[in-house]
Image (tube, rainbow, N blue to C red):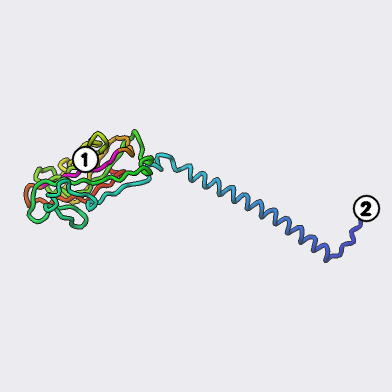
């Protein structure tokens, strides 16, 4: 039988040391569990970002001011008002614009292939389905063989809206970094009673 000769003070010190050891172990266990929980949370969050969502997590905005008339002689027919192209003064006729779609080698891999794409055209057609004014939009590409159409042509005459609005372009295409892409936009008015406008295009927009 072992007889302890520790005083009350010594026993209290030993008890305090054991308590520190115990709390240290508990603290370590809690820290490890927190780290594990954090890792699981991060992995769970990352797993929610599917490749499709990652690919569609960008949009390319092309304001009208980034577009240029295809024919320099048409420059005098139009002006930019509040960021949109409109006809200047009493000018009438038809003007085509080239609007570059800047898809570089870093962005191309993020564009879904063999699937549908869309673009939103922002415009105003003051006679709706009439022929006195309209806005047309078409996505094209240029490669070593020349220029080819990528999408069908959008026409504002398909809608009766006469105020500032937007239209949808939907198409399927495999984008390639070997091609140069641009939208060709046409704006027309046959008389000064009409006031059409082209504001810009957003590629990869959720257009409905």
Regarding mark 2 in the picture, which secondary structure is present there? loop
Q: Which residue is mark 1?
A: 138
On-image quarter of the C terminus: top left
Q: Is 193 left or right of 148, judged from the image as shown?
A: left
What residue do we see at 82% from left, 62% from top? 11
Q: How many marks?
A: 2
Label 2, residues with CA under 10 Å away: few <14, some 14-19, many ≥20: few
Q: Nearer the viewer, residue 180 or 45?
A: 180
Q: Residue at x 13, y 42 (%)?
A: 129
Q: Position of residue 176 (x, y in %)?
A: 33, 37
Q: Is residue 9 or residue 68 the one in the foreground?
A: 68
Q: Is residue 98 left or right of residue 116?
A: left
Residue 198 x %, y %: 19, 50
Given this view, does label 2 or label 1 mark the residue nearer the observer? 1
For the residues marked 2 and 1, what is the alpha-carbon distance in whole angstroms? 99 Å
Q: Which residues, given as a range, are shown in magenta?
A: 179-188
Q: Is residue 25 visible?
A: yes
What label does residue 8 carry, if any?
none
The residue that label 2 is drawn on is 1
Residue 55: percent from left, percent from top? 39, 41
Q: Which residue sits furthest bottom?
A: 9
């Amino acid at each position: 039988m072992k007889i302890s000769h520790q005083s009350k003070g010594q026993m209290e010190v030993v008890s305090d040391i054991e308590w520190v050891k115990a709390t240290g172990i508990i603290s370590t266990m809690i820290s490890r569990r927190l780290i594990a929980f954090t890792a699981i949370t991060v992995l769970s969050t990352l797993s929610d970002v599917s490749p499709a969502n990652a690919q569609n997590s960008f949009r390319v905005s092309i304001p009208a001011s980034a577009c240029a008339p295809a024919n320099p002689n048409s420059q005098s027919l139009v002006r930019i008002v509040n960021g949109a192209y409109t006809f200047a003064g009493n000018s009438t006729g038809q003007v085509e614009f080239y609007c570059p779609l800047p898809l570089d080698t870093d962005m191309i891999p993020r564009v879904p292939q063999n699937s549908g794409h869309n673009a939103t055209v922002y415009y105003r057609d003051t006679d709706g389905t009439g022929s006195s004014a309209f806005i047309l939009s078409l996505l094209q590409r240029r490669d070593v063989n020349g220029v080819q159409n990528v999408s069908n042509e959008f026409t504002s005459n398909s809608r009766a809206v006469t105020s500032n609005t937007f239209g949808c372009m939907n198409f399927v295409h495999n984008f390639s970094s070997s091609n140069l892409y641009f939208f060709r936009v046409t704006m027309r008015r046959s008389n000064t009673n009409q006031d059409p406008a082209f504001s810009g295009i957003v590629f990869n927009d959720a257009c409905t």
